Image (cartoon, grey):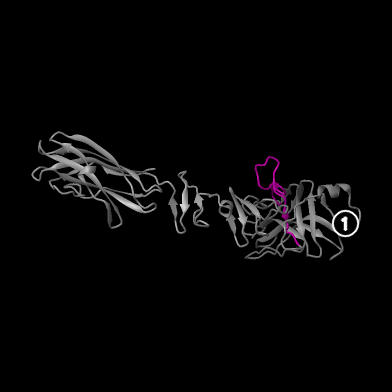
Amino acid sequence: MTVHSAWLLTNGQTAEDTRLTQLGATLPADPLTVRSGILPGSATGSAIVAAFGLTSQSGMSATVGPGRAVIQGTAAQGAYPVTLSDATPVTIADNTSQYARIDLVCLRVYDASYAGEQTTADLEVIQGTPSAVPVVPAIPELTLPLYEVRVPAGASAGGGGVDWTTQVLDLRATTVATGGVLPAYGNTTVPGAYPGQYRGLGNVLQRWDGTAWVPYPQAVGGIAPSDTFAGAYTGQYRDTFESRLQRWDGTTWQELVPGFSLNGAIAGGGTTSTAYVSTLTGATTPITADFTAPASGRVLVRVTGRVVSSSATASGYLTVAVTQGSTTFQAASDDLAAVGSGAYPHSVATEFQLGGMTPGLVYTATLFYRSSIASATATFANRVVHVEPGR
């Protein structure tokens, strides 16, 4: 095992020690100290962290890969840059107890200038105490935990060993230079070091605002990601899973460009009413389409259906009324109706534009029907109302 540390040895620091430990990674914890952690990155760029990775796990042994780290002492001591330059095996001691225990695989610095008799940096295992409810052993000063290993009762090289797949907790935490984007790994719940610090969490870039980690677009006025629950300010925009933009109005996300609204029914019914009605004999549920008025305040309304009358001289009128809440915005009207005349079935359609709506309010379009002659039944089928935003 070769562990290098710069500015630790009282004498004998080599040029190699100095070169290998030029980390440039000190993220402030306060005005005098920095945060301990390991440098992120991998050879292929495909992983957040490769340093000090575990390989060759078998029985009671595993291998810790090379890596570089910073370990902060007291404010008076400063920070110790440490590099493990070789893949190094570690061995977990047998557990002869009837209870499990928890061990820690750690990087540890010893500095005789402040305590103890040795001055060195090591990769070591801190052994826990067997217990019915095992706990993590106390972490000494100048120690950076890498892994927590649960050692079952009776574990030994010849007796099953450690389950390295399910009984190991990765404790590695990242650190970067001041001003660098911190890839959160092992420290996702740690607050920021200063307002304006950035970090990457999954596929989201976040900025520390002095109180909380805020998705980066929220902080600068850009488009927030689709999973943003609440806007940061009125007028902010966010993407949606449907690839449309929404605008935060201070309370809810509103569609920037509302989509179309459509409703209809194949089955139909009839009426002898010469006044407009919204229900039919045999079709007692009104057909409605709710829509949000766009910024233009205008929509295009299409009405289609199949009409037939019981009298060759009668006609069936199919139209729409638009309401906003309990207020009628546009009443059912012959001027906006599709008309089918006679006893032979006709497919009819009409479309028209309505303007003057209040942007952002929800309106309802409802189909209405009537017969031109009270003694004749007008029957309507394949009824559809379609509303889409206008410019």
- Residue found at the very far right of the displayed protein: 11
Residue 40 belongs to magenta span: yes
Query: What is the quadrant of residue 328 in the picture?
Result: bottom left
Q: Nearer the viewer, residue 279 or 282?
A: 279
On the picture, is 269 further left or further right than 289?
Answer: left
- Residue found at the very far front of the displayed protein: 356
Q: Visible in this render: residue 289?
A: yes
SS of the residue at dot 1? loop
- Residue at horizontal 91%, vertical 56%? 11
The kind of secondary structure the magenta stretch mainly shows is loop
Dot 1 amino acid type: Leu
Q: Could you say where residue 273 lies in the image, as x and y percent from the top left?
A: 13, 48
**Quadrant that contains the C terminus:** top left
Q: Label 1 neighbourhood size at 10 Å, few (<14), some (14-19), many (20+)?
A: some
On the picture, is 354 further left or further right than 227?
Answer: left
Q: Could you say where residue 135 lies in the image, as x and y percent from the top left?
A: 66, 64
Q: Which residue is mark 1?
A: 9
Q: Nearer the viewer, residue 371 or 381?
A: 371
Q: Visible in this render: residue 93?
A: no
Q: Nearer the viewer, residue 51 or 205?
A: 205
On the picture, is 391 further left or further right than 216?
Answer: left
Query: What is the quadrant of residue 129 in the picture?
Result: bottom right
Q: Could you say where residue 28 lies in the image, as x and y percent from the top left?
A: 72, 59
Q: Nearer the viewer, residue 286 or 233?
A: 233
Q: Which residues are magenta?
A: 33-60
- Residue at horizontal 75%, vertical 55%? 26
- Residue at horizontal 76%, vertical 47%? 66
Q: Is residue 309 above or below residue 292?
A: above
